[in-house]
Amino acid sequence: MGDINLLNYYGLDWLAMSFGFIGMWLLGKKRKVSFIFTAVGMMFAFSVSVLSSQYGFMVANTIMFGLAIRNYIMWHSEERDGRFAKR
């Protein structure tokens, strides 16, 4: 068994995980900012994908980033147009 190094990817993997968890938590609380946390987490995850040459994850993180931004914009426009119940 090899040495365990928790910072192989400069802590970017830990940041990706943390921002993803926070984003999901905030989404459960119906907070619009959850999409921003998710998008930032996807940027960290994309960086880890580049460092580890995981091309499938690069594509997946790019798509997830786009979806998070799209959903943030949709939520914002629904709030602005009054189609969404404000808290």
Image (cartoon, rainbow, N blue to C red):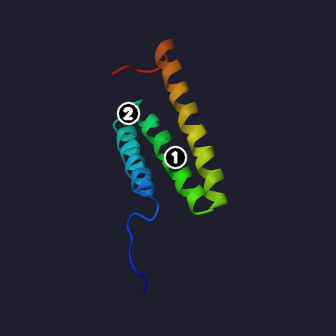
The percent coordinates of residue 52 (x first, y second) are: 57, 63
Which type of secondary structure does the marked residue at label 1 adopt?
helix
Nearer to me, 73 or 11: 11
Disc 2 marks which amino acid?
A: Lys
- Furthest residue in direction bottom, as rendered: 1
Q: Which residue is mark 2?
A: 30
75 vs 38: above or below: above
Is 35 on the left or on the right of 61, as rendered?
left
Whole-number angstrom distance, CA of label 1 to CA of label 2: 20 Å
Disc 1 marks which amino acid?
A: Met
Which residue sits at x=37%, y=32%?
31
Nearer to me, 61 or 72: 61
Q: Which residue is mark 1?
A: 42
Name the quarter where the C terminus is drawn.
top left
Nearer to me, 38 or 1: 1
Which type of secondary structure does the marked residue at label 2 adopt?
loop
Is 64 on the left or on the right of 87, as rendered?
right
Nearer the camera: disc 1 or disc 2: 1
Q: Residues within 10 Å of mark 1 (few under 14, many from 20)?
A: many
Is 80 on the left or on the right of 25, as rendered?
right
Which residue sits at x=33%, y=37%?
29
Name the quarter where the N terminus is drawn.
bottom left
Precedes in sequence: disc 1 or disc 2: 2
The percent coordinates of residue 20 (x first, y second) are: 42, 48
**In the rendering, which numbered label is found on residue 74?**
none
Is 37 on the left or on the right of 78, as rendered?
left
Which residue sits at x=43%, y=57%?
10
68 vs 17: above or below: above
Which residue sits at x=51%, y=52%?
45
